[in-house]
Amino acid sequence: MMISFVLPRNHFCELRSVFPPKLAMKVSFFPPTNSCSSDASPDEGVVEDLPIIDEKAVEQLTEGLISHYLPDLQRSKSALHELTQNQVVLLETLEQEITKFKECNYILDVDALFSEAKHYHSKLVSIRNEMLMLHEKTSKLKKRALKLQQKRQKEELEQEQQREKELEREKQLTAKPARRT
């Protein structure tokens, strides 16, 4: 739907600046040019087929139209400006919250690393304890092996001494020829 207004040039520029861009596309103003210079002819761009109307009536109608719509449009403009500012603030807040969530993720990663470090520390402690226990067992086994070796050497020495005694005894028991004198 297209709305058309025929306005004098001075009101045309004022009203054109008030309409939001999307609404300005649906509203056409005569003259349709965007130049609002005072050196242009006031009749420039006026449609030829329109009936001639009293300029004072046109002026009053224009002022009435502007006074009727301008406050609402200005309030809408300020509301849109405030909404835009609120959106900017909201976007900044959202960015801050996103940053906080990222930091929380980093903290969770650090927590995971600490829990993993605790896990590996407990493994190291258990391995250390196991190594100490194995060291004790090996030292006990070495002492036992040394005792067993000493006992075996003692037994072998006793057996050797026993054999020597038996050999000596056999030598003494063997008959000796008597000597003649």
Image (spheres, rainbow, N blue to C red):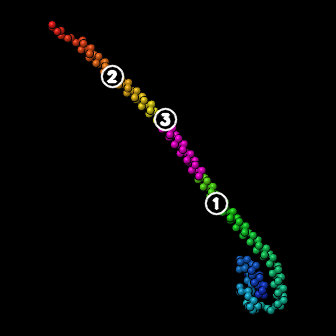
Label 3 crowd (10 A; few <14 / some 14-19 / many >=20): few
Q: What residue appears at the point 79 percent right and 91 percent down from the top-left corner? A: 51
Main secondary structure found in the magenta portion: helix
Residue 16 got which mark? Answer: none
- Residue that protrudes farthest toward the left in the picture: 180
Residue 106 showing in the rendered view: yes
| Residue 118 x %, y % | 56, 45
Q: Seen in the image, is 154 located left or right of residue 49? A: left
Cα separation, mark 3 vs mark 1, equals 51 Å
Q: Position of residue 52 (x, y in %)?
A: 80, 92
Q: Nearer the viewer, residue 55 or 98?
A: 98
| Range of magenta residues | 110-131
Disc 3 target residue: 133
| Mark 3 touches mark 1? (CB < 8 Å) | no
Q: Quadrant of the N terminus?
A: bottom right
Residue 4 visible to the viewer: no
